[in-house]
Amino acid sequence: MSKKRFVSRSVFTILAASFLFAAACSDDSSPTSEGGTTLVQLNLSGLKPLEEGFNYQAWAIQYYYAYPLGIFNFNQAGQMVNVAGDSVLSGEFAVNLAPDEITDIAISIEAQDEMATTPAYTLILAGVVSEGQVDLTVEDELGIGVSFEDAAGKYVLATPTDGSGTNENSGIWFLDLSTGVSLTGLNLPELPSGWNYEGWVLVGDTYLSTGRFDQFSAADESSDYSGSAASPPFPGEDFLQNAPAGVSFPLDLAGVSVMITVEPWEGYDDNEEAPFFLKILTANIPPDAADHVTYDMSPVSDPLPAGTATLTQP
């Protein structure tokens, strides 16, 4: 049987809906199995516990169609567990397809405690089946589908939303002033639907978001802490007002940590008070940091989530 890759998320969503309708109407054009059952053994690393009712789901892909394999989560010890979190799972799931009918395996993040019938846009890991084996990666086109190998970033300290010369170390903006002109400070790949970037600073034990964004030369989605003046057309935040409990504003950012993360869609409520675990860029702001000076960020050295899948017949 010849194999071809899965289509894009948007086309797949339409085709999946069409397939479900066709199956209900016994449409002969829908895919059929040659018969048999496949056991899929997952071995995953780097995935963290999901909260607020979110879980992971594994999928077997046949051409343009996705078949649910199983739903699961992880505990703090890194073990795969059921959605209730009270039972450790072996990582083995079954699907009513023959092994040579499965073209890909994928892992998504789902906003429910029951098996979904169509993958959410937040596919995080995937890989092509080759002789019964699969390498699952973030970079695969059915996962997040981008490489962060060349990720780089720059930032400056400044507070443009309360005027010049005031509390200048209390704001951070992801831009580059090294040439004397305001240029984008982030070199990051464009993310697919379902994912955004978000900036964070860590003050003591408290994470403060600088805002979500998907463009690097435009304002981000929030200005929760900024002043009343106009902000520059770049992601960033001034920490001047509406301070959360335990933090005092204006906030001197010298000496604190800053990071850029990849975040699931806005419905993922677990990211309100802390970053998602996909950290891409980080920096420790110098203790003697000066305002309007361009500083570099570095790629995070921790490996991204990954895994393998092995397909066998019982």
Image: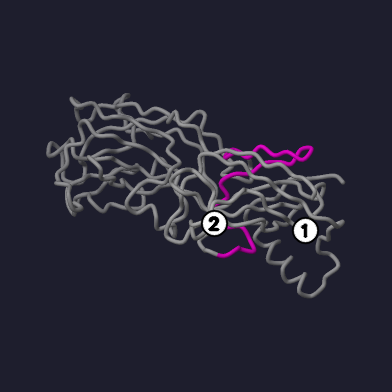
Q: Is residue 128 magenta?
A: yes
Q: Which mark is residue 96?
A: 1
Residue 196 at what x, y percent from top left?
A: 45, 48
Q: Secondary structure at mark 1?
A: loop
Q: Residue 202 vs residue 139: left or right?
A: left
- Per the image, the residue denoted by label 2 is 82
Label 2 neighbour load within 10 Å: few <14, some 14-19, many 20+? some
**What residue appears at the point 58 percent right and 41 percent down from the top-left corner?**
44
Question: What residue is drawn where x is 29% and y is 40%?
Answer: 201
Few, some or many C-alpha atoms within 10 Å of disc 1 (few <14, some 14-19, many ≥20)? some
How far apart are the alpha carbons under marks 1 and 2?
Answer: 21 Å
Q: Give the extent of the magenta segment.
A: 114-139
Q: Residue at x 38, y 35 (%)?
A: 184
Q: In the picture, residue 174 is in which quadrant?
A: top left
Is 245 a magenta residue? no
Specify the quadrant of the image occupied by residue 51.
bottom left
Q: Among all residues in the image, which is located at the extreme left?
A: 166
Mark whose residue sits in front, 1 or 2: 2
The residue that appears at 53% across and 55% down in the rendered structure is 87
Viewer-side residue, 129 vs 289:
129
* The furthest residue to the front: 87
| Residue type for callout 2 | Asn
